[in-house]
Amino acid sequence: MQTKQLILLITIATALSTILIFPTHAVGEEGTGTLNVYTNQERTTLATTDAEGRYVTAPGTEYYLSISEITEYNIGTSITIWVYRTNTAENIEIGNFEVNTELDAIFTWTIPDNWLDEVAKIKYGTNLENDWLFAQKEIWVNARVGTGILYVYKYTWGGEEADLTEDKHYLVLYGETYYFNISGIEEKYTYEVDGVKKTRVWARYRNTDDPSIGELPIETTPSEIKFVKFTWQIPDWLPIDTQIKFKYGKSPTGDLDEWVYARREIESAPRLLFIIPEVFLGSAGAMLLIFSGLGITTLIRRKKT
């Protein structure tokens, strides 16, 4: 009798398991649903991805998205989609959807105009408090890199370059003026003023607005390489280790055809960074030499008196 009851219970449990889907993830974990970001309404062309596999998007642009293979919820369950803005930890609701027979959620979303240089994640679930998951893959807003390569010189264009970090950022001293060159520009983000082709250049650092460097003429080398050059004084209020990117194009925000980042960045550095490494004995030796120098100076002064 007990054997028959056990077999009956197993049969019922097996039947229920084919109908019900039991959650296997905790709140806040990565779910089975994978985010797809398309640039066309037919959802046939995926947005490009960066080196980390994040979809590259532009502010003010509408994208066509889907979350495929959602297995945590039954077909017919009403779920909500949120965008999680990592820069500010905001959750923005962008729609309510019913899980369909393909276990997909399909929706559209326009990247806000004021989003710059940040990661957005997609959440899905029934309740933001206790029942949601992150979709696999992320969105990177405004990570477009152009063909122009940034070169930074200390005293004059084409002279001694500023120091480079291991990750190829130029180290610059705040308050100092440097000579910049963005070379190898192939994009057509230009316009003509009195017959002269020009582009605009902006600096981008932290969460500030993009200060304009200026409207610059596009010059050409004998080998037809296009470039722009300018001088710029590093703001003296910037904290140490601030990374600064440079944009060039028609407008600092907007569609993909309006602007791009130059390759390479600059990074503000403390003045001691340029002194201590040049001393053979290192930091401790440098400090010893400084205090030794003070002692010698004092001794000389005493002898003179």
Image (tube, helix red, strand yellow):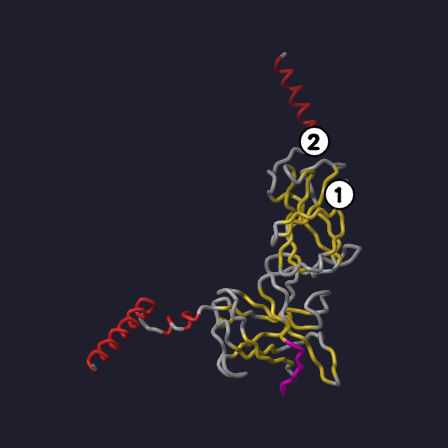
Q: Answer above or below: position of 93 versus 116.
A: above
| Residue at x-position 74% and y-position 60% | 61
Q: Secondary structure under badge 2?
A: loop
* Between 171 and 214, the one nearer to me in the picture: 214
Foreground disc of the pair 1, 2: 1
Mark 1 — residue? 96
The type of residue carrying mark 2 is Leu
Mark 2 — residue? 20
Outermost residue, front side: 305
Report crowding for label 1: few under 14, some 14 to 19, many 20 or more residues within 10 A (C-alpha): some
Q: Is residue 269 part of the magenta span, yes or no?
A: no
The majority secondary structure of the magenta stretch comes to: strand
| Residue at x-position 34% and y-position 73% | 279
In the rendered image, the quadrant that contains the N terminus is top right
* Between 177 and 148, the one nearer to me in the picture: 177
Q: Which residues are magenta?
A: 214-223
The type of residue carrying mark 1 is Asn
* Between 96 and 89, the one nearer to me in the picture: 89
| Residue at x-position 69% and y-position 66% | 253
| Residue at x-position 65% and y-position 65% | 144
